[in-house]
Image (tube, rainbow, N blue to C red):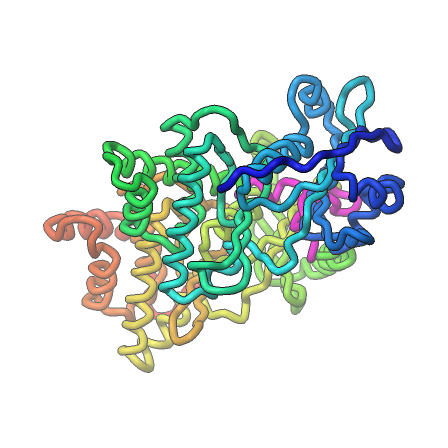
Amino acid sequence: MSTAPAARVKRFRLAGYHCAALPAIESAIHTRFLAAPEDHVRAGRVLRETTTRVTGRVAWEGVGPVLVKFHRIERLRERLISLVRTGRARAEWEAARHLHGMGAPVPEPLAVGERRSLRMLDAAFYAARYLEVLEPVSEALSAQPDAMRQALLERLIVLIRGMHDRGFDHRDLHTGNVLMGPGPGDRCRLAITDLHRCTWGRPVSSASRRRGLAQWLHSLTSYMDADARWHAVDRYLNGEPSGTWHRDVERRIARMERVRLKSRGKRCFKNSTVYTSDVGSGQGWRRRDLTLERLANALAAHDAARDPGHPAFVKRSSKGLVTRHGDVVVKERLADGALAKFKDALHARRHASGYHNAHCLGVRGVDTARPLAFVREDGRTYSLFEDLSDLPRLDHLAHDLFASDRTAGRRLLDASATWLRALHRSGVYHGDLKGVNVLVGEENGAYRFHLIDTDRVRFFDDEVDHRRRIKNLSQLAASIARCVTRSDRLRWYRRYADDWRPREEEKRVAREVAAQLAQKILVVDEPIE
């Protein structure tokens, strides 16, 4: 990175905004932007939108394509914080000016503006040169040949080390915030974006370096295994003693993954580009691709299908009613009797557990019925899910395959054992893991297993413990018809237990499973409906 003189800026006030901009940009701001800044951004190509921020590509005459971020500050807490802390737009402007002046690969900053009342921030914008042919590394990396991908990752490690050595700490560096141009990875153009959290002007501490490197490597977990990350740390250190660097970086990556999963798991309860709290006259949440009209129609059709003879009726128990309408399944939570209603009132958060758990499973990459909505209206509680009824149940499929083709049946059991082992290792536990609650699809000749009835799913930071594993094993074993022989069940268990515990433990664990099976109703010939 070479040092270049920072371009001069012109400061002015317009339409309540205190602005700073390159001289060539001032006229475009006067004529095209500040009359209605948010509308102007929306009139271009919206790239990203949240409840308080919209980012878009707009064309300014004489300037070309410009990336504009408009911030709307509505919460009182954020407005109060703006009294003592630099706003996000201005922080990004200052960091970009500094980095661009040093020759760092960042988009050229063009303008910034803030509007305040009583010294508190109301709205702000930041404009930078739009890099037309560049796209995020997260989207472009997979298109690179293996050798060029490795060369690109090496370049980026060197770039991160160079920024740290020059006193710059990005503090939010991941593959979505690094852009790359077309061409091979060893020489394509690079650009770093989203600089609002960047700090500079003082040496970057060892802890900050490790955190920044771990954050970058965490965003590359789908491309780099532990050995590749080890090599990346060595490349960053460039011959310096590693000490505890490798262990510390891996520990930080594991912690970041736990935080990521928990954070993304809460997004189904937040207004965003995917979810909204607008569910009509009731309260709750829905995916935006499920329109209000479809939601209302599904709930109305559900009310009309309460009779077991209705074609849309699926099942009814003391706890719930399930109906199916096109590609939507509606589950209504029932509470029969005063005691059940009292328990429901005490544990109101459990009403949304199926909806929330299905979303969390999707975040973890576990196949499930996509959650569409959770609604409470007139004292009634509904959860809406994607309809996967075209997929066969695990118990049905196992029964049919072992009756017709035992080799195919064993292939199914081997795949299900491997799937369940991976599920438990990732910390996912289903409290009612029966064949009826596992649907089986097939993709490119491989089985894909989908968990449904997710009300009793739980998530753990570590692997599922021994007691819960035994419970799941006995639940699944009890629900599979006895046409699956004892030898095939032992084969299934050994595939599940492979590389999990020493072989000498198998008999003890088998006795524990058998003890639990003795207390259950076992399926003999036909799967239980």
Where residue 28 appears, as percent x and y from the top left, is: 83, 45
Asked whether 389 or 97 is in front, the reply is 97
Residue in the picture at 85% in, 29% down: 13
Q: Can residue 21 be seen in this view?
A: yes
Where residue 410 appears, as percent x and y from the top left, is: 28, 72
Residue 70 shown left or right of residue 522 in the figure: right
Q: Is residue 427 magenta?
A: no
Residue 343 shown left or right of residue 238 in the figure: right
Q: Give the range drawn in magenta.
A: 264-289
Residue in the picture at 50% in, 69% down: 391
Residue in the picture at 26% in, 57% down: 496
Asked whether 165 or 528 is in front, the reply is 165
| Residue lying furthest bottom | 404
Vertical side of 285 occupied by 244: above or below = above
Where residue 504 appears, as percent x and y from the top left, is: 10, 50
In which quadrant of the rendered view does residue 234 lie? top left
Asked whether 154 or 256 is in front, the reply is 154
Residue in the picture at 36% in, 60% down: 479
